[in-house]
Amino acid sequence: MASFDMYDDEKHTEVDTSSDDSSTQAPLLWSPEVFERRSRWRSWRFWLPLGFSYILTAGLSAVVTKSLVNRPCASKDRVPPFLSSIDRSLHVEMGNAAGAVGLEGKETWNNFTMSTEFGGDEIEDWWYDLGVYTTAILVPEEFAEDFALDPAKHALVRPDDPDYAPGSVPYAGYPMAFEVTHKLHCLNLIRQATWFNHEYYRSIHHRTWSGEGHLTADGVPFETIMREHVGHCVDVLRQNLICDADIELVPYLKGRGNSNDWKRPKTCKNFAAVREFVANHQWTAALTTPFFLDDHHASFKGTAMTRKPKHSMEELWRGF
């Protein structure tokens, strides 16, 4: 007697090979009904694990994605609700070529970069318009989570804070600074610290170069503080450049040796919108004394950044 066991769960009738009556023999092939049952079972055995795997993968992906989005480095373009009024649209600007613009016959890059020998006090007016001396803004306490703020670590002021005059703290909040204005401040400080500029700013008692803009510690030489300040600014810009890791490629000019073509279109965010937000949200109580810039500029009380710059946004981009 021969037996055909195709699957453990299905047993077939044994075939009697000694009999000549074919009508009494069990079929050697599956009947249509048996084949249909086997096909359905094989289909379910394929699709059930696949469906379960899909659901499991989707669930894990959702968990991982949520954890990544909530990380500080998830997306620099994610705008918290407190800053949602800032226009973050993109536009195209043309970069400056690597050469002097010859302002009134002066060999210089532009109004932001010329030496004080040629530009004098007007250079600082251009940087002032960018917002390098803006005060802090006060972020309401309710937005603390959006900015990863911790009251045990970060300064938090309240309307009843005894360190401030009554009414000068409109609501409980965290004093904060914008990255862009801080980076511009650092770039300006490095410019002032160059060998052809620093003596000028010392001579006019600029707030940064006279100790006015520093919280000096007893026994710490001012020169040490300045070295630390300049070093901090170099390091901040260094880390930000590495963090951004800009991969835009810049070609070399034909017949100009190793000179790059910097006069090329650049996709930019709306700095004017950011500047307007900063200017309108300056926390005036952050300046407890009149703002002193240097001997050649008038001191004033309140905001340290004009709401309307002297120069147009186009001029502030080009530098002339």
Image: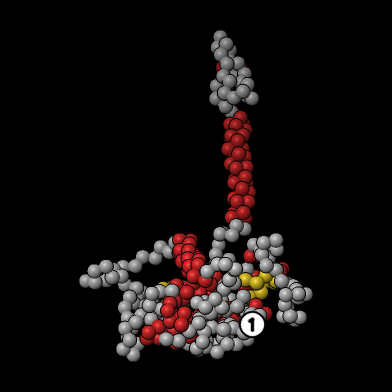
Q: Is residue 89 visible?
A: no
Q: Secondary structure at mark 1?
A: loop
Residue positioned 57% across, 16% down in the render: 3
In-image side of 33 versus 194 (left or right): right
Image coords of residue 275 (percent x, y): 55, 79
Image coords of residue 154 (percent x, y): 66, 64
Please say if 31 is above or below 291. above
In-image side of 296 versus 166 (left or right): left
Please say if 90 is above or below 28. below
Q: Furthest-right residue in view?
A: 160
Q: Furthest-top residue in view?
A: 18
Residue positioned 59% across, 46% down in the render: 57
Please say if 320 is above or below 51. below
Comparing 272 with 294, the one in front is 294
Image coords of residue 123 (percent x, y): 44, 84
Comparing 131 with 287, the one in front is 287
Give the colour scheme of this rendering.
secondary structure
Q: Which residue is denoted by mark 1 in the rendering? A: 289
Residue positioned 54% across, 76% down in the render: 211
Q: How many circles with numbers are drawn on the protein?
A: 1
In-image side of 98 versus 28 (left or right): left
Q: Is residue 42 visible?
A: yes
Kind of residue sitting beneath label 1: Thr
Image quadrant assignment for residue 53: top right
Comparing 46 with 214, the one in front is 214
Q: Furthest-left residue in view?
A: 255
Q: Residues within 10 Å of mark 1 (few under 14, many from 20)?
A: few
Locate the N terminus by quadrant: top right
Residue positioned 55% across, 89% down in the render: 298
Locate the C terminus by quadrant: bottom left
